[in-house]
Image: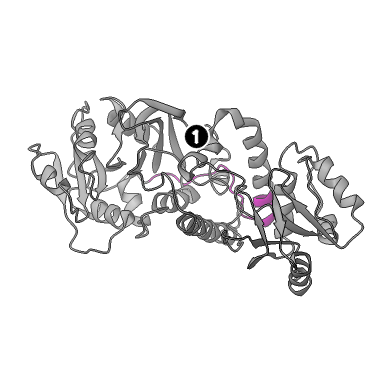
């Protein structure tokens, strides 16, 4: 049995392959990749497909373990590897959306997942050259690159129709943000979790302390037991607006640090994010974000940011404004992509009800998904944040094991969110 290398990603191209298939299983390989099949690759794929009733089967490759598929794995960037097997009968029964230019396989995969298992074989059944040799810190921004806008709109349409079919789609109807949030010591708190950022923490603080606003604000720095000079530098800042919090516990991730900050009696009416190696873009950022939170009023507001190097010089892709977010469909499309953007700001009363998972990756995504299920999220589309890319970033160049762990966690978050939306009746 041969492995086909389809060069046509359209609905018509895939439909022609399925119509012309004369076997029960269709093997497809990425035409960009050199694949060296193992001795029993075909037999193993067929065995597993027949034994599980799967409509789509994929496997590990030499040196490249992959993730098991679940309901929340609906992102179009899920790594199946360059070789997959598709049940011809199941694919014909599932059908295809017409007129797709790029996403026919994505559409077929989602349709099959609604009817049959998608099964990974945790065995290295072939060797392959890498498809994308860029670092994780570069590839993660593909979905916000304006050059790919038409492609992303097609993928969003495919994912949205899938959510509609499974009863997990949300129409643009939102709960009102409660007006009475109780008493707070200041209008806004900038929250900065930090550990071992002696090179950048004073830059971050300076960008906050220079903010011009007609309301009182403070900075809650959660110093997560730094072992470099970070703690010493923080203690040397004489501004009374700086609140230096050191957790009693030593097992807190970034999410746990956020929970500590928002539970503090010194936390303001609004909690605004700043990472310890980033900066606000100008002295009116805090006022602009609070203005947007109150204009809604919104439970959460997400800004836009500019990618810069350590010296704050703009680098590609430049402005990240998440134009893919729309009021009508943003919280559905959020299940397809891996992030909401930055900086993030919250109504503290609502944030205290939701809470953060005690992890150091995906904690912001988890909170944003949960808030978006009930409340409208506001957006600021001008750049208000400088996001530094340097060797100290936690996601600048992840090893495969870490990347898989992070992706698996976000897939799990999406799985929980999809289940919750289905239980709530969807739209």
Position of 155 relative to 116 (above/below): above
Residue 397 pos. (x, y %): 43, 46
Residue at the far bottom: name it: 51
Residue 294 pos. (x, y %): 35, 34
Residue 143 pos. (x, y %): 55, 38
* Left or right of 209 in this view: 71: right
- Tell me which corner region of the image, top left, top right, bottom left or bottom right, holds residue 388: top left
Depth check: give the residue in front, 231 or 350.
231
Rendered residue at 65%/35% (across/down): 151
Residue 30 pos. (x, y %): 71, 47
Residue holding disc 1: 322
- Tell me which corner region of the image, top left, top right, bottom left or bottom right, holds residue 347: top left
Question: Most prominent secondary structure in the magenta stretch?
Answer: loop
* Left or right of 35 in this view: 414: left
- Look at the image and say whether residue 168 sits in the magenta stretch: yes
Would residue 325 be visible to someone looking at this image?
no
Depth check: give the residue in front, 114 or 51.
51
Depth check: give the residue in front, 83 or 306.
83
Region rendered in magenta: 162-177
């Amino acid at each position: 049995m041969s492995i086909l290398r389809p060069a046509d990603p359209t609905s018509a191209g895939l439909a022609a392959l399925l119509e012309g298939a004369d076997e029960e299983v269709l093997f497809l390989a990425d035409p960009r990749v050199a694949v060296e099949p193992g001795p029993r690759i075909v037999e193993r794929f067929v065995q597993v497909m027949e034994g599980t009733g799967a409509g789509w089967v994929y496997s590990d490759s030499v040196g490249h373990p992959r993730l098991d598929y679940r309901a929340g794995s609906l992102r179009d960037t899920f790594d199946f590897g360059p070789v997959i097997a598709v049940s011809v009968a199941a694919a014909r029964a599932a059908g295809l959306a017409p007129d797709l230019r790029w996403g026919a396989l994505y559409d077929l995969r989602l349709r099959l997942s609604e009817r049959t298992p998608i099964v990974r074989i945790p065995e290295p059944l072939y060797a392959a050259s890498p498809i994308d040799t860029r670092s994780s810190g570069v590839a993660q921004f593909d979905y916000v690159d304006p050059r790919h806008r038409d492609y992303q709109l097609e993928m969003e349409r495919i994912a949205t129709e899938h959510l509609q079919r499974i009863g997990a789609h949300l129409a643009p109807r939102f709960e009102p943000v409660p007006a009475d949030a109780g008493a707070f010591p200041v209008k806004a708190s900038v929250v900065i979790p930090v550990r071992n950022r002696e090179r950048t923490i004073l830059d971050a603080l300076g960008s906050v302390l220079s903010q011009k606003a007609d309301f009182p604000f403070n900075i809650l720095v959660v110093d997560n037991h730094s072992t470099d000079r970070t703690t010493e530098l923080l203690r040397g800042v004489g501004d009374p607006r700086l609140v230096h919090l050191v957790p009693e516990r030593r097992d807190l991730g970034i999410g746990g640090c956020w929970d500590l900050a928002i539970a503090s009696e010194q936390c303001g009416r609004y909690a605004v994010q700043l990472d310890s190696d980033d900066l606000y873009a100008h002295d009116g950022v805090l006022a602009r974000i609070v203005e947007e939170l109150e204009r809604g009023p919104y439970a959460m507001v997400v800004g836009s940011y500019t990618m810069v190097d350590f010296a704050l010089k703009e680098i590609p892709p430049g402005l990240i404004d998440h134009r893919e977010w729309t009021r009508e469909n943003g919280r559905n499309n959020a299940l397809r992509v891996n992030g909401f953007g930055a900086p993030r700001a919250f109504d503290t009363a609502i944030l205290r009800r939701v809470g953060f998972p005690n992890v150091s990756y995906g904690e912001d995504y988890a909170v944003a998904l949960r808030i978006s299920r009930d409340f409208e999220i506001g957006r600021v589309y001008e750049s208000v944040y400088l996001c530094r890319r340097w060797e100290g970033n936690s996601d600048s160049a992840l090893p495969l094991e870490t990347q898989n762990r992070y992706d698996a966690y976000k897939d799990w978050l999406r799985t929980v969110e999809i289940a919750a939306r289905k239980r709530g009746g969807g739209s």
